[in-house]
Amino acid sequence: MSVEIPKTQKAVVFYKNGGKLTYEDIDVPTPKSNELLINVKYSGVCHTDLHAWKGDWPLPVKLDPYLVGGHEGAGVVVAMGDNVKGWKIGDYAGIKWLNGSCMNCEECELGNESNCPMADLSGYTHNGSFQEYATADAVQAAKIPKNCDLAEIAPILCAGITVFKALKTADLSPGQWVAVSGAAGGLGSLAVQYAKAMGLRVVGIDGGEGKKELFEKCGGEVFVDFTSEADIPAAIIKATNGGAHGVINVSVSEKAIEQSTQYVRSNGTVVLVGLPAGAVCKSSVFDQVVKSYKIAGSYVGNRADSREAIDFFSRGLVRSPIKIAGLSELPRIYDEMIAGKILGRYVVDCAK
Ligand code: NAD
Ligand code: ZN
């Protein structure tokens, strides 16, 4: 089967960090021998895309001369390089944050591919999914079952995989309490649902219009509003009768991360996922010793985590709370994200 592939396409690009985001015509890329060419139908808009555009992390983005952001792309395989195995034209494929890794270092050997020092990142060091046609390493691209809706699965490709892996990192048992800080955002609204599907009880922290309602729709039990609650640690310790057994930090707030070390239960785990620029995690050494809690970082997931997170979605155990917009509307979506006004996730239609 061969598919007509145009020479040029629409994309949203930027030429310098914090510079204008332009919706323009660029060349359709040619896949390398190890790559798929994916006709991206929909892409989720992750807070990481905002960090990439601002350039507020200590890791420079590729600009040669521009960057195409986006790393939650869902689409259809239209071409592939000579060395690609296990894919065919017409398959549904997902573009993840981890576009490719060396597969040769100790981290890759152990299945920790996201920690590979040579990791190639979609929408950061590799042009991503805010375009109609994007390339992806065939080994890391996600297999999407044909029963999945491509708009709804898009957020699973970063947000879903990331929170699924973070919940595994928290190492909890059914019936225990997990706190999700940033519970009504893109990652948070999925974290609440994965946690519920794993048999956990969820306390969520977020604030602003409609956030509590979305949290409850996702299956959350107790909501704490950070805009009105004066003592967040005390409120969570009370609601959970002693503190959360695990905390998934997906807010972009340094203060919220510090607070999470105060409401985690003894022997529990604080998981760091959100990446506020320049933040440090402050934890009282006395409290951490006496309560013996752990603080762990969690960074997207490997290929198995990705397959498993997609499987929860394709079986209907989690649903994406999405709002669909056109790709050309990306600047407005970033403004809403900066203002903290987004409920769940925006997904852009890459053809509009
Ligand atoms: P988002 O903007 O959709 O959600 C963030 C949520 O946090 C919002 O609902 C906001 O209201 C809430 N919030 C703000 N201040 C808060 C506070 N003080 N307490 C509780 N909640 C608060 O963002 P997102 O797309 O879900 O991404 C979140 C973060 O996770 C970003 O920093 C992103 O870069 C990072 N991220 C990390 C990984 C990883 O692998 N570690 C993967 C994807 C994203
Ligand atoms: Zn992301």
Image (cartoon, rainbow, N blue to C red):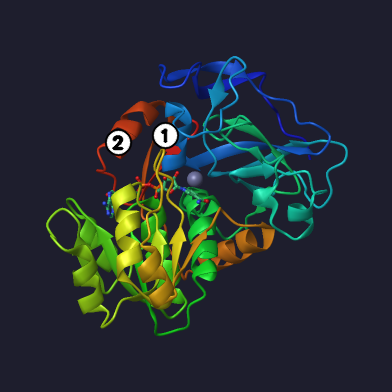
- Crowding at dot 1, Cα within 10 Å, few <14 / some 14-19 / many 20+, comes out as many
> Can you tell which mark lies on residue 50?
1
Residue corresponding to mark 2? 338
The residue lying furthest to the front in this view is 286
Residue drawn at (39%, 54%) of the image? 250
**Quarter of the image with the C terminus in it:** top left
Q: Secondary structure at mark 1?
A: helix
Query: How many numbered marks, from 0 up?
Result: 2
> Can you tell which mark lies on residue 213?
none
Asked which quadrant contains residue 248, the reply is bottom left
**Quarter of the image with the N terminus in it:** top right
List x then y, in percent, for residue 289. 43, 72
Asked which quadrant contains residue 269, the reply is bottom left
Residue 45 in sight: no
Indicate yes or no: mark 2 CB to ligand 1 under 8 Å: no
Asked which quadrant contains residue 236, the reply is bottom left
Q: Secondary structure at mark 2?
A: helix
Residue drawn at (77%, 35%) of the image? 2
> Which of 235/283 is in front?
283
Residue drawn at (80%, 49%) of the image? 105
Q: Is residue 219 above or below residue 122?
A: below
Indicate yes or no: mark 1 CB to ligand 1 under 8 Å: yes
Marks 1/2 in contact by CB < 8 Å: the verdict is yes
Measure the alpha-carbon separation of dots 1 and 2: 8 Å
Q: Mark 1 or mark 2: which comes first in sequence?
A: 1
- Is 227 on the left or on the right of 110, as rendered? left
List x then y, in percent, for residue 111. 72, 59
- Crowding at dot 2, Cα within 10 Å, few <14 / some 14-19 / many 20+, comes out as few
Q: Amino acid at mark 2?
A: Ile
List x then y, in percent, for residue 141. 68, 47
